Image (cartoon, grey):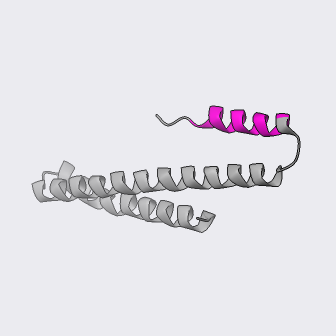
Amino acid sequence: MDFNKAAGIFDRLQDLVNDTQTDLTKFTEGNSSAGTRVRKAMQTIKGLAQELRVEVQNQKTLRFNKLLENNKGGNASYSLFLYCYHKDSDHNY
């Protein structure tokens, strides 16, 4: 898990949104087939967005675990602070 993976997913997501704009314009001009393509693209976008959310959360967890690992044998109250800070910063709506 690295930043490049998250950035790659985001780039794919952004490209798909941009590519869908033409079909959306066609749909608003009355082309029903373009509407079907827009709906299909939106479903793919939904999946990519979820994939990106999971990747970001995985990277956050990995960073947190590294912080804890670097503090092994250190100050217990600092480890507790890190745990509480990480726990409070996760908002999975």
Q: Is residue 90 above or below residue 63?
A: above
Residue 25 shows up from this direction: no
Asked which quadrant contains residue 31, the reply is: bottom left
Instruction: Classify residue 82 as left or right of residue 74.
Output: left
Residue 52 position in % (x across, y down): 48, 55
| Prevailing secondary structure of the magenta residues | helix
Q: Is residue 12 above or below residue 51?
A: below
Q: Residue at x 73, y 55 (%)?
A: 66
Q: Residue at x 54, y 66 (%)?
A: 5
Q: Nearer the viewer, residue 67 or 48?
A: 67
Q: Quadrant of the N terminus?
A: bottom right
Q: Residue at x 84, y 38 (%)?
A: 76
Residue 2 shown in magenta = no
Residue 51 position in % (x across, y down): 43, 56
Q: Which residues are magenta?
A: 77-90
Residue 8 position in % (x across, y down): 51, 67
Q: Residue at x 17, y 53 (%)?
A: 35
How many numbered circles are shown?
A: 0
Residue 82 shown in magenta = yes
Residue lying at the far front in this picture: please name it: 73
Residue 48 shows up from this direction: yes
Q: Nearer the viewer, residue 58 or 78?
A: 78
Instruction: Classify residue 21 as left or right of residue 93.
Output: left
